[in-house]
Image: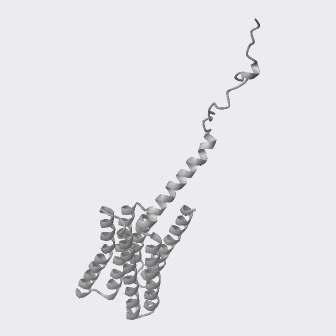
Amino acid sequence: MTTHGTSPASGPSASGPSASSPSVSSPATPDELAPDAASALDIIRAQRHAVRDGFEPDTRVLFGAWGVAWLVGNLLLYSTARGSAGNTPAGWSFAIYFVLLAAAIAVTIVHVVRRSAGVAGPSSTSGAMFGWTWTIGFIGIYLIMTGIMNAGANPEIINLGWSSLSCLLVGVLYLAGGALWHSRVLYVLGAWIVLVGGASTLAGLPGSFLVMALAGGGGMLVGALVSHVREYRDAR
């Protein structure tokens, strides 16, 4: 009897796995993982940027408001004080100067309080307290200068007191804001404003107004420009 063997063509293929066998994918190489990691970092960076823009004060707004107020206000004081008796600025220039300061204070309070409104807990409280500190501080300066005027101080001391104390308060508040929000730009500009306020008294009148306008107001506007450039670079 003849035994028929199985034909090689009818059995499983000896040359490779069957068509139904699952394929095993090779692990991703470092070059393939790099784009995914970069994309994840971009997403994290964008989220941080969005959170910061939503809740932290915009230094461009603060620097811009105070830069314009000090540059325009002190230039008016300087121009009207030159050649006048006792180097005293005209009353109308002081009125405009204080209106500009009041506008800058209002912008600061509204902006900081609005940015802090979306944050719950200590951050919201700190932001609101920081905003109202500006008004409280300038009320204190008004009371101090009123007492100095009632004590019989001469016009030069009064004018130097108004400008230097205002500069000192703004600088210290910027220092506090920089420490509160971990902003180096805000902190450095605060230190600059404090030094400008002290140095302006050494220039006497009417030179102190010019120092305050160019170094104080101009410095703030430069700070606003630097902040804008940094925001633009971070957003790219």
| Number of marks drawn | 0
- The one of 165 and 67 positioned closer to us in this rendering: 67
Q: Residue drawn 36% across and 83% down?
A: 102
Q: Quadrant of the C terminus?
A: bottom right
Visible residue check, residue 100: yes
Q: Residue drawn 72% across and 23% down?
A: 13
Q: Residue drawn 39% across and 70% down?
A: 115
Rendered location of residue 211, percent (x, y): 45, 78
- The one of 230 and 223 positioned closer to us in this rendering: 230
Rendered location of residue 131, percent (x, y): 33, 73
Rendered location of residue 119, percent (x, y): 35, 65
Q: In the displayed image of the protein, which residue is found farthest to the front?
A: 1
Residue 94 higher or lower than 42, as above or below: below
Residue 226 higher or lower than 36, as above or below: below
Visible residue check, residue 88: no
Rendered location of residue 204, percent (x, y): 40, 81
- The one of 39 and 17 positioned closer to us in this rendering: 17
Q: Residue drawn 52% across and 65% down?
A: 231
Residue 46 higher or lower than 227, as above or below: above
Give the quadrant of residue 155.
bottom left
How is the model colour-coded? one colour
Q: Is residue 142 left or right of residue 205?
A: left
